[in-house]
Structure formats: C-alpha cells, structure tokens
Amino acid sequence: MPATERTIVDRTTVDQGSPTAAETIGGQEAWQPWSDARGLRCINCQRWYPVREVIYRCLECNDLLDVVYPRPIEDAEGLKRRWRRRRGSEKLIDRSGVWRFRELLPFYDRDDQVVAYPEGNTPLLEGPRSASYGGVRRIRFKHLGFNPTGSFKDYGMVTGVTQAKILGMRAVACASTGNTSASMAAYAARAGLSAIVLVPEGGVSFPKLSQSLDYGALTLQIRGDFDAAQTLLQVIAPELGIYILNSVNPFRLEGQKSVMAELLEQCAWRAPDRIVVPGGNLGNSSSYGKALRELHDLGLLSKRPHITIVQARGAAPFYNAFNSGAFNSGKSGHPEMLERVHHARTLATAIKIGAPVSWKKARRAVDWSDGWVTSVEEQDIADAKAIIGADGIGCEPASATTLAAIRRLAREGTDARVDPEEDIVCILTGNVLKDADYTLRYHASALYEEFATETTLSPKGKKLESHFANPPVVVDATAEALRDAIRSRLAL
Ligand code: F0G
C-alpha cells in the first residue's frame, strides 16, 4: 500500500491505560474473540481500526489493540485435518509452523505476501529429571529455542515482518533484551528491510548481540535499560516512519499464537492442565491467552489450561500486582497502571523488564484461564537451568524460571499449589547457547547476583550456590592423567 494511504500514529506511551480498562479485561464474557470484519480492536473501549492502519494503541483511550477477524467457517475436525495434511507439503508456507495454522491468522491477502524462514515446528520433550526435581510426576518442555534464531521470537517476527512488508514499510525497529533484536534482524534481512535495534548497553548476552550484528542490523547500544529503550523508540519511530516490531505491535502476537496450536496438536488435542511461561514484556503469555480463547471458541480446546506466568523476583511488576490482590479486588480496585520496577534486576537478562507493555493482555489471559502468576529467586533459576541441562535439553536462564516455578508451587503450600499429578507443559523460550557466559559461570561456581539499591545496580551481589555444578577439569596430556580423571568421576 503506498505511503499516502497510511495513517501514522504517535500516541504510544508505556504502560498507560484508561480507567475503565478493567471492566473489559476483567470480565470473561466481555472478551469476544471474533469481529464482523477483519481489523484492529481496542481491548478496552472496543474501538475498531482498519487492518492496514499503522497504529499500535487506541486513539481514543491509548490502550492495546488486538488483531481480530470473523470466525473461521471450517469446523474443528476440518481444521485439524487441514493443519495435519500440510505437514506433508513441500510448500514454504506449509512448512512454517506458523503459517501452517494460517486460518488463525488471516490478516494477509495473498500467499505471495507471506514471509517464512520457515520457523516453528519445535519439539515437545519429556523432562524426567526436571519432573522429579520439580516434585511432579511428569513435565514436558515445549522448546521454542529450536527456531531459526534460537528463540520463540521467530514465531511472532514472521507475522510482524509480513505485515511490515504489506504496509510497504522500509525500516523496522525494536527495543530488546537480545532475542527480539536477533530475530527481527534476521527476518528483516530475509525480507529486504532495514533493521534498527535498540539494546541496553552491557545488558544483552554476547551471542544475542552478535546475532544482530551478523544479520546486518543497525545496532544501537543505549546507555540505559530496556524500559528506556522501549519508551524512546515509541517517540522516534513515528517521526522517522519506522515500523515498531516490539510486542506492543499486535501482529507479532498473532504469530506467537501458533505455539498453542502446535502444542495442542502435539498433545493429540488433549489440552494440558497447566502451561507455564516466563513473563518479561508479557507479549508471549498474552498471545497464548488469545490463542486459547480462539481455539476454545472453535471447539479445539478440551479444557482451559491454567496459564501460569513466572517472573524473576527482581523484575516482577506483574507478580507484585497479582500478589497484592490488585487484580481481584473488584472494579474500583483495578490498577490503571502497573507499578513499574525501577532498576529491574535479574541475571536472566531476557526478562529484565520493569514496565511490561502487554500486562493488560496478560492479565486477561490469566483471568480467562484461571491461571496464576508467581516469581522465583535467582538461586532457583540457576539450579533449575542446570537440571534442564542435565535432562539433555538445556535453555537460557529466563526459560528456566518455568521449572523453578513448578518446584516452588508444588512444594510451597503458601502459593497456588500444583498437583503432582497435573499434566504440565513448560515453555522454554530460548536456546541453551543464548547465554553461554551464564552457564559457564554456574558450572565454574562463579555466578554472582546483581545487586540493586534505590539508585544503582552493581554486577557483584551475593554469590549464588552452584548446587548442580559440572565444572570442566583440566588434565595433563597423558594417558595416566586421563585415566585418573575419568575414574575419579565415573565408576567405570
Ligand atoms: N524468554 C526469553 C528467552 C525472552 O527473550 C523473553 C523476552 C521472554 C522470555 C519474555 O517474553 O516479553 O513476551 O513476556 N525477550 C524480549 C526481547 C523482551 O527483547 O528479546 P515476553
């Protein structure tokens, strides 16, 4: 579409909303998944916008937008059969684990508009050691780190970049803790768009930073945190005609819905009892809520899995609000704004976010699914990550919050109890190689918590215990030394 036909909107600020937002997002019945016509709809005042408008928030009340469509006409069995059939196809659009479920994403007009790597088709893995560590009978991990750029972001970037192309945008941008930027850089390069990434200086792991460099993005290291980068981008992007691909962009969340469709198909359409997901900017959990809401309405969900969102204790604004009872204290008690965490603190840098943009959608997901929100300590994240590694799976620190949360919820009677017999799926959001430095430090017993005061953040806080350390052993290059080293560790 030519630029003259587009409306570019600059009404975006972080974590604001209207006083009446809760009336809509709190009430389950108020959440209608479909609309008469394809478009963008405010989650609060329901105002509707054309699908090709460049807009990230409602012009009326500044709240978040959903992409909405008329209800698909095909019945549940027909959709299941169609999606399964595509698995045998050689067409790129069918080989994508996102576009395979395209009946849930009809915002594009023609197949040739679609960008695909392909992405998705990630495995569902049994984690027996993790289950026993977590205190439950069985845990399965849906490992989204098996994507082309190593994180779940590819599920949403493919749809975000497709929309950018349809809109005729020339440049895309995001603020990131490292994975969004890696993914956006790759997809922009594949689609022939310029990419601009804003990352907190010193706050992104080297592998993630190296990805955006290698994929050719203009990489701006901000002397500030993720929250500052996110706010700044919302100011400059409309001025420069740049399309924002943070999760405030609802087209990103559309693609991420496919994770739920794929997962349910892998479970033979028997929904798990609980889906555990790390929460940072809260886009991922929001998209899972939207997916489950739609799939439920289509008759594809046997029950509502409890969406359980986990934050790191030092970066837990959503948990703080949930835990304070602010989300269930009736209309007048609903927070209009989430109290942000200044100096968000966690070694799980992917989720080091103090002012999550999508918190209202995430809350809608928790409400609808009768879910839960919890937080976990740095020590617990570190140990859980080593256990997931010992299962031969591995993940980045943010993903390990899921197992840490299960252990906490299964053991502590003080929080929502997880029944040991529950059918649990934990979402692993990033590949083990995304933060090799963290892994090496853990196994070398040299991992230190970040330490925050009111005004500063220091890298050397308390030393974490490496309860499951598997340190490398340096040996002389002789057969004898090797034999000794092996025998002292393994009973051979
Ligand atoms: N896990 C990983 C590995 C992530 O990279 C992120 C977010 C999350 C979990 C949290 O997901 O924000 O949708 O709640 N990373 C973003 C980024 C913020 O810039 O890469 P969320």
Image: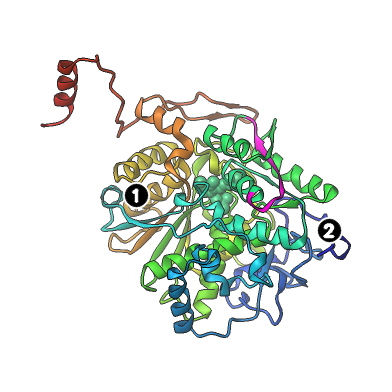
Answer few, some or many: residues within 10 Å of disc 2's Cα (few below 14, many 20 plus, some between 14 and 19).
some
The label shown at residue 460 is none
Q: Residue at x 38, y 53 (%)?
A: 414
Q: Residue at x 47, y 74 (%)?
A: 83
Secondary structure at numbered mark 2: loop
Distance CA(mark 1)–CA(mark 2): 47 Å
Q: Which residues are magenta?
A: 190-201
Q: Earlier in the sequence, mark 1 or mark 2?
A: 2
Q: Residue at x 60, y 61 (%)?
A: 253
What's the amino acid at mark 1?
Arg
Q: Nearer the viewer, residue 246 or 355?
A: 246
Image coordinates of residue 173 in percent, x first then y, are 71, 47
What's the amino acid at mark 2?
Ile
Residue receiving disc 2: 8
Residue receiving disc 1: 407
Q: Nearer the viewer, residue 351 or 408?
A: 351
Q: Residue at x 61, y 55 (%)?
A: 157
> Residue 325 falls in which quadrant of the image?
bottom right
